[in-house]
Each structure stands twice: as structure tokens, then as C-alpha cells.
Amino acid sequence: MVIYGLLLIFLIVLLAPFLFKAVERNLEVFLLGLGILAAVVSGEFSLRLIREAVVEPVKITGAVLLFGFLFRWSRQKIRHALDWLTLQLTLPVFIFLVVVVLGLASSVITAIISSLLLVEIISALRLERRFEVHLVVIACFSIGLGAALTPIGEPLSTILVAKLKGPPHYASVLYPLGLVGFLVIPGIFFLGLLPSVYLMKGSTGRDTLEEGEEGETVWSVLLRAIRVYAFVMALLFLGSGFKPIIDEFVIRLPSLVLYWVNMASAILDNATLTAAEIGPALSEAQIRDAIMGLLIAGGMLIPGNIPNIISAHKLHITSKEWAWTGVPIGIFLMLVYFLVLLLLPR
């Protein structure tokens, strides 16, 4: 009965955000409620879990808050620096650096701040809209990959380290870097070269992407940090609550099957799937392959990752526009990384 109850909760977590706008607008509260329910149903709800859920989100929330205020206060200086850089560098070199630097920096300044910087850069470029959409999607793939290298980069890694910090993995702050860094970093540099393919098709025009008028306020910075804290707390409850499902079903899947199953990350936030799938009973190969599937597929569609959602919202990119670029790139990367993973020890 416990398994059936948890499977029902799992289906509600997956489907409700798509069926009900109110759930989508209040996702953190929704997930927190269901996470607590899952933990109660599975018998995992305890003072230890409550302490973990209160403490673990502090680091990433603090980073989001700190860099959010730094970004707000230095926004004009950032814009002036971008204007200067575009005059000093050729367009292909500048774009390569944008994709690579934002991807690598996201592990330190968080995926959220990297995506806000991306919005500033795109607003300043004033290139043809179609090319800028390609650039935003590619850069968000890079940010999504890079942010996973540390627990402060994005919720996925925060959840990963929190759930594996005990035996047998004893995950530390550097665990994600050691697990997938050798796969992620070359991918970021490859993505830096990819916009050149679209540049050859032309990049000038009147129609261009531009950020809306909402801007960054003190309240928006605070609210974003609060939402991140609640989101990570909810995922910790969900992850512990779904432990019986992991032990019963996920652990039995071959690692490369789990890799392809995680293409679901294209339509579901990859941190949510990490909370549902990853547990200490999985082997390191299963964890590595599952995480890579989540990271790559997370860039394919707007709902798959936090940078996608922020960039698409602020630059008014439609789901269709995103998919035209994101899906082909995502499928190509999934195939390439699948071949690479085949060569690694199981």
C-alpha cells in the first residue's frame, strides 16, 4: 500500500503543474506539501529529516541572495562593461566567451545569476531575433551543465549531495565535480563553438530580443531567494519520501536505461527528478548516467531547467521558438554522451 500511495503522489507531482495554472504559479508550496505527505506515507518523516530540510537549502539560498543583490547594484556597470567588450572582441569570440564563461561561472555564482547576466548580454547585443534565440538556448544548456558542478550552482546538485552525504558515497561539496566534471566541462566548450553554426546563417536584423520592463527590485531578489529555499526544502522531503520507490524500482534499472528515461527532464525540472530518483542504494555508474541524462535533457524545453525559465520569461521567448533549437541540440548531445558513457566502466 505504501508503494501505491507513493506512486500516486509521484504522478500528482509530475502532472499537476501541467494541468493546473494555480499549481504552476505556486510550485514551491505545492511540492513542499506533497513532499511532507510522501515522507509521512513512507515512514521517513522525522526530526532528522526536518533538520536536514531546514539546513541544507541555506547555502544555495545565501548564494542566490548575495549574488542577486550584487547583480542588482552593479547592473549598470555590467552593461557598460558588456558594451566595451563587444567593441574589443570579434562577435564569434565574444559569443564563445559568453557561453563558456557563463557555463563555468554558474557553478559559483548560481545558475540564476548566470541566466540574469545572459539576459543583460542578449539585450545589449541587438542582433537578429532568430540568432539570439539560438544563442540563449545554447547558453542555457551550458549554464545548466556547469551549475551542476557544485551544490551552490543549482538545486539539482544541492539535492544530490544532501542525499548521498552518508554511506556508501559520502558525497562532499566536490562530489558533483568528481562525478561528472570530466563530461560536463568539455561539453561546455563544445557548446561555446556551436553558435558559429548559426552565425553563418546571418545575425543582423531589426527584430531583436529585449528584456521586459520588470527589472530587478529588492523585493524580486528577496522573493527569488525565498522561493529557492522553499523549493530545495520541498525536494529534500520528496527525495526522502520516495526512498521506497527508489529501492523497489529505480535501483533495478541499468544505468544507461535510466539515462534515456531521464529525457523526461525536458518537461520536468531536473531537480525534481533528482529528488525522486537518486538515493544511496544506486551505484556510482547509475548516479552518473542518471545525472547526465537529466542535465542534457533539461535544456531541451523551457520547463526543464531554472535558467530556461528565467531567460524565456524575461526575453519573451515562446515555447515553440525554444523547442526548434533546444530539441535538436538536446537529442544530438544525448546521442554523443550515450556513446561516451558506453565506453566508461560500469
Image: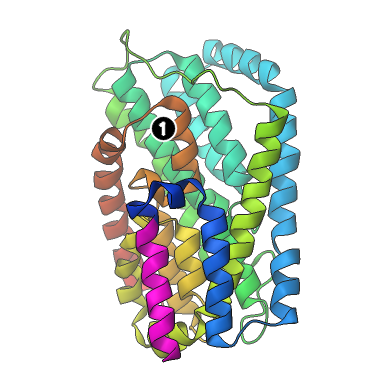
> Residue at image x 38%, y 43%?
302
Quarter of the image that includes the N terminus: bottom left
Q: Circle 1 sits in a helix, a strand or a loop, which is it?
A: helix
Q: Count the marks.
A: 1
Residue depicted at 31% across the width and 42% down the height: 326
Image x and y of residue 268, in percent: 39, 57
Q: Answer above or below: position of 343 versus 110.
A: below
Query: Would you say residue 333 is visible in this rendering?
Result: yes
Question: Dot 1 corresponds to which residue?
Answer: 136
Task: Give amino acid for label 1.
Answer: Val
Q: Which residue does the image show at 48% across and 83% down from the upper left?
A: 283
Q: Position of residue 265 (x, y in %)?
A: 37, 58
Quarter of the view holding residue 162: bottom right
**Drawn side of residue 200 relative to residue 139, left or right:** left
Main SS type for the magenta part?
helix
In the visual, does 194 lie left or right of 149?
left
Q: Is residue 292 above or below residue 316?
A: below
Where residue 215 appears, as percent x and y from the top left, is: 59, 22
* Residue 15 in magenta stretch: yes
Callout 1 environment at 10 Å: few (<14), some (14 to 19), or many (20+)? many
Residue at 56% x, 13% y: name it.
88
Q: Tell me if residue 66 comes above or below residue 234 in the rendering.
A: above
For this rendering, which residue is in front, 278 or 318? Answer: 318
Q: Is residue 346 visible?
A: no
Segment tinted magenta in the rendering: 1-16
